[in-house]
Amino acid sequence: MIFSEYVKNELLPLAKHNKNESIKTKYVIRNNKRVKKKVSDKENYKVVYQDGVPTEKRIQNEEKKNRRLGQKLGKGKRSAKDSIIQMRRKRSFMQRKKLNMDYQYNDEL
């Protein structure tokens, strides 16, 4: 086997595997069902899907700025919907408890 074949057959698949190394699977509750969600544990990276395959992509500065602005606007809107949010959160925690997922609901919220 010559060196170029070795790199093509042995090293390139390893490099592709390491690229997705920090994509983790997180379980969330959606519509009272346990759903897998792919997340990145690298800071300033997000998970995007290309042809059904999750890949990491660095968040651009403009998108970071837009997210911050959206969070400020959302904070104002959220205060009006607090009781609905509490009710849904309680329902979600109760469902998590039924499915034996990690954290539980605390009535002090």
Image: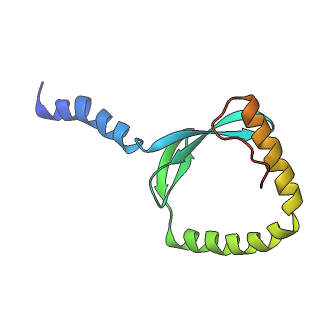
Q: Residue at x 37, y 44 (%)?
A: 19
Q: Is residue 16 left or right of residue 31?
A: left
| Residue 50 image position (x, y, % from top left) | 54, 44
Nearer to the camera, 72 or 5? 72
Give the camera-side residue of 15 and 71. Answer: 71
Please give the count of numbered marks on the rendered protein. 0
Image quarter of the N terminus: top left
**Residue occupying image coordinates x 43% and y 45%:** 22
What color scheme is it? rainbow
Q: Residue at x 28, y 37 (%)?
A: 12
60 vs 76, nearest the viewer: 76
Q: Nearer the viewer, residue 38 or 101?
A: 101
Residue 38 placed where, x, y %? 56, 42
Say which residue appears at 75% left-offset and 42% top-offset: 93
State the quadrant of the C terminus: bottom right
- The spot of residue 9 in percent (x, y) is 25, 29
44 sits left or right of 89 in the view: left
